[in-house]
Structure formats: structure tokens, C-alpha cells
Image (tube, rainbow, N blue to C red):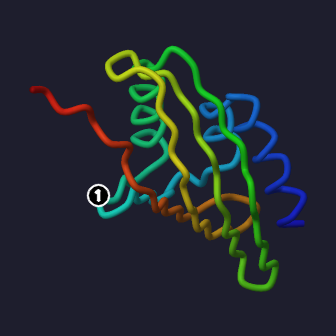
Amino acid sequence: MLKQNFLRFQALIEQGKTLEAIEEWYAEEIVQIENTDEPIRGKDVLRQYEATNLAGVNSLSIKVVTVVIDEMQGLVLGEMEIKFDSKKSGPQQLNEAFVQRWEKGQIIHQRFYYSLPPHPTSV
């Protein structure tokens, strides 16, 4: 069941439907951590966070390149390639690892690990 759920989640994010993915697959009590940032707690807060991020880009492309699913523990581990055209910084790419914990068909905890793209230095 977890594999089928994740594949449906993956299809949404790879279609650029990240807000729809949050609505359908994230638990109300979701906790999400970006690298070492403070946790984002709750679906409403996460939805607003994602909407703000989306407002800052002209385009977005997400591709899940590897995934490991552990049905017994409710864990999904993987890597994504995220390409976007930032309204401030232009084209960017993130290679991002993620860990998700699923319960009752929803993501309850998610953490992303990535290096930020280098920023041009002014001279």
C-alpha cells in the first residue's frame, strides 16, 4: 500500500502539483524539516510555506531519481532533482535527499537534505 501511495504522490510532484500533493498526502500534524532549519509544523503552515516558495519562481521541475520504500517501517527514502527558475536568482538546481515517515496513508514527518546553490558574489 505504501508503494502505491508514494507512486501517486510522486506523480503529483513530478507534474508540478506540489500544493495538491500537500492536500492529498500530508497529515494535518505534518512536521517538515529543511536541512537544519526549524521544523515546519502543521499542514496549514506547510501549505503557506510552499505557496510562498512557488510565488518566487517562474517555473519548477521535480524528478524523483531514486527511491527506497520500507513498508514495514512506513519509511520512504530517496533523492530528487529539482530545477527551478528563481525570480531573484535565475535558473537553479537542487539535488536533494529526503526521508518520509508515513502513517495511515499520509506523510507525518519529512526531512530534506541538500546543499544550496552558490550565490554569485558581487565585486
Quarter of the image where one finds residue 87: top left
Quarter of the image where one finds residue 60: top right
Position of residue 90 relative to residue 50, above or below, is above
Residue 116 percent across, percent down from the top left: 37, 48
Quarter of the image with the N terminus is bottom right
Mark 1: which secondary structure?
Answer: loop
Residue at screen point 57% across, 34% down: 83
- Residue for badge 1: 37
Residue at screen point 64% across, 38% down: 23
Residue 12 percent across, percent down from the top left: 76, 36
Total number of numbered discs in the rendering: 1
Residue 70 as seen in the image, left or right of residue 100: right
Residue 83 as seen in the image, left or right of residue 117: right
Position of residue 48 relative to residue 101, above or below, is above
Residue at screen point 42% across, 22% down: 86
Q: Which amino acid type is shown beneath numbered disc 1? A: Asp
**Nearest the eye: 22 or 87:** 87
Residue at screen point 77% across, 72% down: 68
**Nearest the eye: 46 or 18:** 18
Label 1 CA crowd tier, 10 Å (few <14, some 14–19, many 20+): few
